[in-house]
Amino acid sequence: MRVQVAIIGAGPAGLLLGQLLHRAGIDAIILERRSADHVLSRIRAGVLEQGTVDLLDEAGVGRRLHAEGLVHGGIELCFDGQRHRIDLQGLTGKSVTVYGQTEVTRDLMDARAAAGAETVYEAEQVSLHDFDGDSPVVRYRKDGVEHEIRCDFIAGCDGYHGVSRASVPSGALETYERIYPFGWLGILADVKPVSDELIYANHERGFALCSMRSRTRSRYYVQCSLDDRIEDWPDERFWEELKRRLDHEAVANLVTGPSIEKSIAPLRSFVAEPMRFGRLMLAGDAAHIVPPTGAKGLNLAASDIHYLSRALIDHYRSGTMREIDHYSARCLRRVWKSVRFSWWMTSMMHRFPDTGEFGQKIQEAELDYVVGSTAASTSLAENYVGLPFEV
Ligand code: FAS
Ligand code: PHB
């Protein structure tokens, strides 16, 4: 089999790239290790930057997003028992849209099926070959049969644990990593959200986040120990701990109920440089990971696909590699700014083992400065709504 682009991974990065290439008349196949149902079962991101919304519109999958997504003009920071609103819209002229990654993925899967573009689910033993030359090859097994795909380019959209970055000779990669000494315990519950906008809470007991998926489905997180297991956190304990980290008004308004999903996610910052090796380009979590505090992971994947789709389209229209040659540097400039913001928000909002009483006072002073300074609030706001896609 021969295609122009072989995409590894049917998460948001791979599906969005497939959709943008299809609309440009470029032939791409997607190979996904898991089943479509498994991919859709993952509960992940919830906040979309305006740039991501615009890209989904460009991909022709914005209808449900605009019908069901919740446009938020602000977020709230809760510390020292008080909530303070950051006016994203007033400070930047931009908003964010609350619309779950699961729904983004579903919309992209539906569009790809409607277009008749091929996705091979449950593709086993995917392997990448000869991407340092002009004729890369991808091999995989499906239902016990070996397959080989010849292509012009491979897009490694297979996440942090994927095969793409692992296929790059180790000497060709520089990696940067910071692992955080805590995790996020998240639950999904069909209860009314505690507030109209997201609440990020700093508390001496640890971080908490009040988010949502709709006006009737809430998403909550509390910082937890990396030693914790799901069974250590029955619903009752979760709700009591969340209340201890929120302000009085939020506690009074909190509607609790049975969790329909519960998971613990470790937090890390990770970047692999460069993001291109010959005719293999990495995108999304395959190249970088951020702690979810800044709501950047999914949006950075979309950012990479903004650059990668334009570079591939330019190649097939111009016959040159001029945009592909700039792909990695363009992505990394925006990636590192998002990595910095996510690290900064995580450092300001969480309880570290060495935070102590002095560290708690410093965090509260920083938060007090941020909410009291137009310059500092604007800096947080313009990073949160998403920095521009630079050319
Ligand atoms: P993904 O990991 O989503 O997709 C990669 C795909 O490749 C997967 O479907 C995988 O099955 C497939 N794959 C892997 N290896 C393969 C192989 N060898 N062959 C074929 N296919 C292979 N981001 C936020 O912005 N906000 C959040 O709140 C948030 N919460 C998160 C919670 C958790 C537990 C995790 C793990 C991540 C969270 N993220 C969050 C980040 C997350 O949303 C990612 O940034 C986003 O999924 C990135 O999309 P992709 O790059 O497509 O990678
Ligand atoms: C979510 O709704 O899952 C969410 C929202 C904002 C974040 C992280 C997670 O910063």
Image: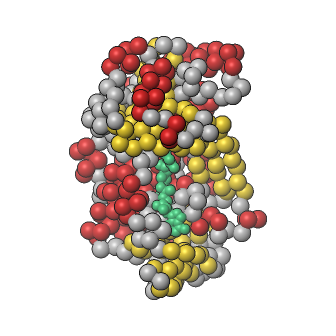
Left or right side of 121 for 178? right
Is residue 143 in sight in this rendering?
Answer: yes
Residue sticking out furthest to the left: 67
Q: Which percent across, then down, holds residue 171? A: 76, 65
Q: Is residue 296 visible?
A: no
Taking depth in this image into account, of 99 and 162 the one nearest to the observer is: 162
Query: In which quadrant of the rendered view does residue 359 lie?
Result: top right
In front here: 1 or 224? 224
The image quarter containing residue 255 is top left
> Which residue is painted at 55% across and 54% down in the image?
285
Q: Locate residue 296, reporting x and y percent.
A: 50, 43
- Tell me if residue 174 comes above or below residue 82 in the rendering: below
Q: Which residue sits at x=62%, y=44%?
A: 268
Residue that protrudes farthest toward the right in the picture: 171
Question: In the visual, does 56 lie left or right of 171?
Answer: left
Measuring from the top left, give residue 315's x and y in whole percent: 50, 71
Total residue callouts = 0
Q: Quadrant of the N terminus?
A: bottom left
Is 108 placed above or below 376 here? below
Left or right: 102, with 201 as reference point: left
Query: Between 294 and 189, which is closer to the camera in this rendering?
Result: 189
Residue 246: name its quadrant: top left
Residue appearing at x 52%, y 36% in the figure? 232
| Vertical relation: 46 (above or below) 167 | above
16 with respect to 207 (left or right): left
What colour scheme does the image use?
secondary structure
Q: Return the x and y of residue 279 as percentages of the image width and height.
A: 59, 72
Q: Relative to residue 110, is residue 233 depicted above or below?
A: above
Residue drawn 23% across the image and 45% down it? 67
